[in-house]
Amino acid sequence: MRGGAGPRRKEGENYPLYIRSTPTENELKFHYMVHTSLDVVDEKISAMGKALVDQRELYLGLLYPTEDYKVYGYVTNSKVKFVMVVDSSNTALRDNEIRSMFRKLHNSYTDVMCNPFYNPGDRIQSRAFDTMVTSMMVQVC
């Protein structure tokens, strides 16, 4: 995973709770890509409407491809958005692996939310969450 991002809050509260990228010199570029992808996430959510609420699978799939990257999305029941930017040249990465990575992110995010010392809405500074994201990025690269 070249660039990555973590969760974002509900609709209208689109500030990052966690963002991580490798290499770090492209962080601003990835931050921009993640921000622009939020419009696509909102479009997909509104297009699904009630069907999204009824289904258990929250994986949005490929949001949009660029020449160098693919941007994927996931949204939780509480409307927290996860966005992942992956290098387009990584052809070994299949849709089910991306889906699995989002589930791991969601589980780790849930662990962060269950921490009594975490204030919802604050940036995520959990070592366990960071370690999990790092291991996913190493696995993909």
Image (cartoon, rainbow, N blue to C red):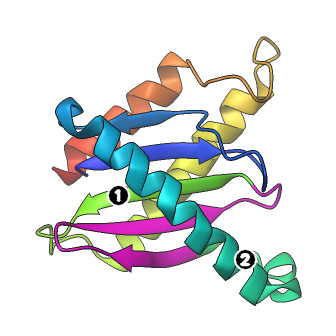
Residue at 33% in and 38% down? 28
Read off the magenta span: 60-79
Q: Is residue 70 above or below residue 76?
A: below
Gap between marks 2 and 1 measured at Cα: 19 Å
Q: Is residue 78 magenta?
A: yes
Residue 4 is at least partly visible in this image: no
> Which residue, given by chain and number where applicable, does mark 1 sit on?
85
Q: Is residue 66 magenta?
A: yes
The amino acid type, in three-letter code, at marker 2 is Ile
Which numbered disc covers residue 108?
A: none
Residue at 76% in and 20% down? 115
Residue at 45% in and 45% down? 5
Front-most of residues 63 and 59: 63
Front-most of residues 54 and 3: 3
Residue at 17% in and 66% down? 68
| Of pointers 2 and 1, the one earlier in the residue sequence | 2
Front-most of residues 70 and 116: 70
Q: Is residue 41 left or right of residue 50?
A: left
Rendering coords of residue 30 (x, y %):
34, 47
The secondary structure making up most of the magenta span is strand
Q: Secondary structure at mark 2?
A: helix
> Which residue, given by chain and number where applicable, does mark 2 sit on?
45
Rendering coords of residue 41 (x, y %):
61, 70
The amino acid type, in three-letter code, at marker 1 is Val
Instruction: Name the image quarter holding residue 8.
Output: top right
Q: Is residue 105 left or right of residue 21?
A: right
Number of numbered discs on residues? 2
Instruction: Name the image quarter holding residue 76.
Output: bottom right
